[in-house]
Every structure is written in structure tokens, then in C-alpha cells.
Image (tube, rainbow, N blue to C red):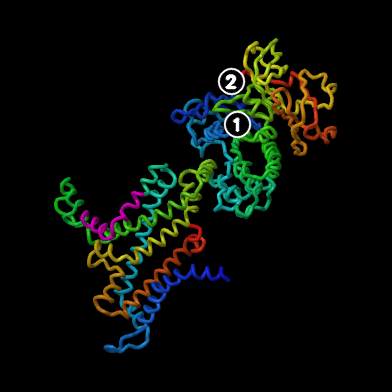
Amino acid sequence: MTPESPVAYDLECRSLTKSFDDFVAVQSIDLAIPAGSFFSILGPSGCGKTTLLRMMAGFVRPTSGDILIKGRSVLDVPPNKRPVNMVFQHLALFPMMSVAENIGYGLRRRGVPREDIARRVEEALVRVGLPGSGGKRISQISGGQKQRVAIARCLVLDPDVLLLDEPLGALDLKLREHMKVELKKLQHEFGTTFVYITHDQSEALVMSDRVAVMNAGRFEQVGTAQDLYYRPATAFVAAFVGESNKWRGKVETADAGRLTVLTEDGVRIAGSGEAALAAGATVDVFVRPEAVALSRDAAGIASMANRMDGAVASVLFNGAASRVLIKAGAAQAEIDVALPQTGEFNDLAPGQPIHFGWSDAQTTCFRAG
Amino acid sequence: MSRRLGFYLLLAPLVVWLGALLIIPHIELLLTSLQVKVKPRVYEFGFGNYAAFFTEPLYWNTFARTALMSIAATALTLIVGFPISYYIAKLARGRSRAILFVLCLLPFWVSELVRTFGWMILLRETGVVSNTLQWLGLSSGPIEFLYNDAAIMVGLVYTSMLFMVVPLVTTLESLDDSYIEAGYDLGGNGFAVMREIVIPHAMPGIVTGCIVVFMLSLGNYLTPILLGGKDSLWFTEQIYAQFITRFNWEQGSAFGFLLLVLSSLIVWAGLKLTGQTLGQTVGRG
């Protein structure tokens, strides 16, 4: 984020802050999005991501900090003059206009000649896969088609940055899965920088080049989907992105990031954490369900640093995402384990004894906040 | 079968209401208007009363003047009412919005007569406005603001305001803010957003409000007489004169019927001109 090379980034935020009365919605956000990339901001509702997006669009004036588009500050540029366009949460397609009139709206505002508008609108319709639909009313097209019209309406203006405010939220699951792929494809074809905000981690992880996880007005971590998933920087990211088993405990021994932790349930776990963690510190321990290996006998998991045994409490069948809940340890705490789809455990039934284990490298510990 | 019965029972009050107060009087009005007086107490069927309206310039001139003034009053009410409604529906928040709405409603807690007298107290020769201007030294003598078309217009707009603001606020409230934001985001200025998004959306409310205000103004009697004086030349005055002063019920009925037909024609023409249909707008609004 060096100011000397401004052109490399389509969108930059510099210590951007927005406070409403005594509530700080967005707190000193620094952010730089390279040209042509798909950037997501992922966070729970109320984390400030909508306020951040609305500041980029120009609907909310930041309390302090700066927003730069292609290296130029746009703080004093009103929303209708900013080279950014927004796909609204409920799309906000104008119901009194046809599909073509919706897409042509921005071009008409720019005073583009009528023939050019007709041509560019049809081109945009072809690119989003809806050739010849210009004459239809908004009420006549399906949810997925509305998404594409909303995107075409923005992209026909060739913006520097396209902002998307959870546009897939209103769709049913199947269509949402389809539109995720579609959006990524459209972004790739148009080469426009996308800033996408969502509370749905799968949308963010699947589509984005980089994801920022936002919580309470701050960025917890910015990185690739893999970074967030495998190398969470904070306890919040570890808990928010993906599923995790979580324990709280005290560090017993610490050796340059290799820790042993005694949990409150009295289970001893070998894990890894930042080097600054010393014996006696209270930590939260996270283990992903798919990091845990199952075995019918103790020998099957002998190589694992953490080994436990217990009894199957229940099997939650959900196709490829099936889970087993195992009761283990003195406290009979339930542990969530992904069910391997190799067929070996298909006859698993509640009450059966089971061994399970996981490596210390896949056990992340964070200082408890 | 019993569902059918329930439907008819529920419909009955409406049918009685419409029949007793609207349809029967109008049939009576129509029949009376078609009686032409040939000599005292002798009547025969004919269209003479209607012919009188078209052959006597005073009558149709009065009607044309009433219609034009009502159209002007409607337009003025719309021009004044739209910004007020937009502010109440879109810009005011919470408490201030409720207060503003009540402020619009407040004048209707007193009778139309009292409200009109209020205007007379302000506008007459020895009234508040005239005295204030003299006190400020802007005028050397008393000025009469009453008994002209402007005074009638002020009264009509004031009386009709609520009937424009209520439907407008209702339709404007149903316009999601994101449409307005999208209008700006895609490069529109305030004027373009107003013309392409807000006004088309508010069209049902505009049409409903205009029809109500136009009909109320056209059929108004009190305001034109009190603020316009003897020479206000309002069509309802002609009807009143025929019924009460001249005791010519046949002619009065014909005028009453003409008022209904001609005002309906004007509303129909207005809808045609703006490309709206009654079902589409009033049904939606």
C-alpha cells in the first residue's frame, strides 16, 4: 500500500473511520484492492461492512480517513459522479422500466446517443447471457436473471469498481450455488474489480481472490481463502470461518509455538500457537472437524499427537458434509468430526466405541480474549 | 350456498348505501331534468333544460371557468403538496414525521366554514395582511385581498391539501430508498432521479390525489362564495340559484347532471392524456 505507486490499486482505503454519535461502525480500516481482483468483506451482521461499502459508494461520509479510486481521492465526489457502481441487496431494479431501460439508465444519464445506447445495452445483455430480453418487464424475469440484469446495469457503465451488497441473499440455495460460479465467471470476463460484502462464508471463500474478515468495525484478517481457513490470525477468524471444535484451557508447556494445553474439561491437547504464548496463559483451542481422523482401534491413530476415544453420540447425515458427534473424556463433551466418505464408517451407529485423533499442527491456539 | 349468502349479506349495506344515496337520487335527478315546463304546472318530456345550458353563454362559460379554475387549483395543490409529501415520506424520521403529518391534518379538525372565515380575517380590507402592510409602510391605504380569483385559489388549495398529501405520502413511503440510491449511483442527478424514478413510482398517488382534489374543488360551494364574493361565478352557485332562488328544479337537475357528466369526462380525458388507467392507478395506490 505504498502511496508512490497509486495506479496499481483500483480502490484504497486509508485509516477510514465512521462513527455515529458514540458508536464506531468502521474503525480505521486500511485496505488496498489490486485492479481486476475479486475482493470480499466477510463479517457477521452489524460488523460495519455495509457502512464501509456505502462509504465507498459515496452514500455515507466518513468521519475521518480517505478513499482513493485509481489513486485519486473521491471523498468530495458525490455518488453519481464516482466511478463505482453498486449492486444493491435487493437489486433495486426499477420496476417501472423494462430490462433494456434499466440497463440503459446510466448511459442515458451520460447523454450517450440513442443508437449507441441500444447497441451497448444489447451487448451487455449478450455478455450476461440474456440476449433479446431487453423488452421484458422486470416482473417477468426470474430471480437469477434479475441478478444478471442488475450486474449488466452497472457493468455497461464500465466502472472502475463494482460494489456488491449481498446480492445473493434473497435467492434459494440451488440458484445461489449457481450464481456464485456465474458471478466469478462474469468478474473474470469483464476484468472489473469487484468488492463483495457478505455474511455467508462460502460465498466469500468460493469467489474471492482475497477476503477480509471484519468484526466490530475492524478487519481481523485479510488474505486468501486458504489463509483464512488454514492459518486464521485471530480466534474470531478461526471461529467464524468454517466449523471448529473449541476448547478453553491453560497452557502447561510452551516451546516456540508448540504448546500443551490442559482444557477446562481436563483433556490434555498438543497444539500450536504464536511464540509469545507462555505457560499459564489462558487460550482457546480450535480443531476443524475434518482434521480429526477416526479409527475403530487405537492403532489406526497411533501416529497422531492427540488421541482420544469415546462413543458415537449421533450421526448427522448430510451427504458429503456428514458429521459424527462423539462423546469423549471425563466431561462427556461432544466433539464434531467430519465423516470420511470412503465407506469405511458407513455402518457407524450411536453407542459404538470409536477412537479418534488429530495432529498438533492442525490444532490452533489463541490467547483467550 | 351459505358462503354465497354471507357474500350478499356483506354486500347489502354497500348496495343500500349506493342505492339510497347515489343511484336513486341520480335517477330522480335525470327524470326531473328531462321535464320541460310548457306553462305553469304543465310539463312535457324534452331536452330543453340541457339545450339551455349550451345556448346560454353564461351557463357554459361559468362551467368552463369553474373547470379551469379547478384544474389550476389541482395543479397548484400538486406542486405545493409534492415537496411536502416527499419530505414527510422520505426525509423526515420518526417523531418529526408524525408531527408534520399531524400538522397537515390539524386544519381539518375545525369546520370548513371556520377555516374559510380564518382566511377572510386575514385577507379582508381591514384584515391582518392589509394592516401589516400599512404598518410596515409598504402600502399607503387599506387593500382588499378578498373577492377575486386569487383568493378563491388560495382557499381551494388550502382546503384540498390534505387530500393530495395523504395519497402521495402513502405511495412515496412504499418507494424503497435503494431505488433512489441506485438512481444516483448510476449517474443520475436529483432531477433525473425525480423524473425517472420517484414520479413514475408516485403516479398512482398523484392520479388519486388529483382526481379527489379536482372533484372537491369543482363541487365546492362554500369557499368560492365566501372568498370570491357574489361574482365568483362558480358552477355550484348556478345549481343553488336554480334550486333555491328560482325554484326551477328541472333546470337545476339538468345542471347537476351536466356537472357529473362533464367532470367525469374531464377526469377521463386527464387519465388518457397522462396515459394512466383508473384500475391501474387507484387500484395500486
Q: Which residue is mark 2?
A: A369
Q: Residues within 10 Å of mark 2 (few under 14, many from 20)?
A: few
**Amino acid type, label 2:** Gly
Q: Residues within 10 Å of mark 1 (few under 14, many from 20)?
A: many
Rendered image quadrant of residue B23: bottom left
Residue B109, image x and y in percent? 31, 55
Q: Which residue is mark 1?
A: A43
Q: Left or right? Give the position of B202 relative to B30.
A: right
Q: Residue at x 32, y 58 (%)?
A: B159
Rendered image quadrant of residue A48: top right
Q: Left or right? Give the position of B238 relative to B101.
A: left
Above/below status of B56 relative to B129: below
Mark 2 falls on what kind of element?
loop
Q: In this orientation, does residue A71 appear?
A: no
Instruction: Tell me how many marks there are.
Output: 2
The numbered mark 2 sits on a residue in which chain? Answer: A
Residue A319, image x and y in percent? 77, 39
Above/below status of A256 relative to B21: above
Question: Start and end of the magenta stretch?
Answer: B102-122
Label 1 vs label 2: CA separation?
Answer: 19 Å
Closer mark to the observer between disc 1 and disc 2:
2
Q: Which quarter shows the N terminus of chain A?
A: top right
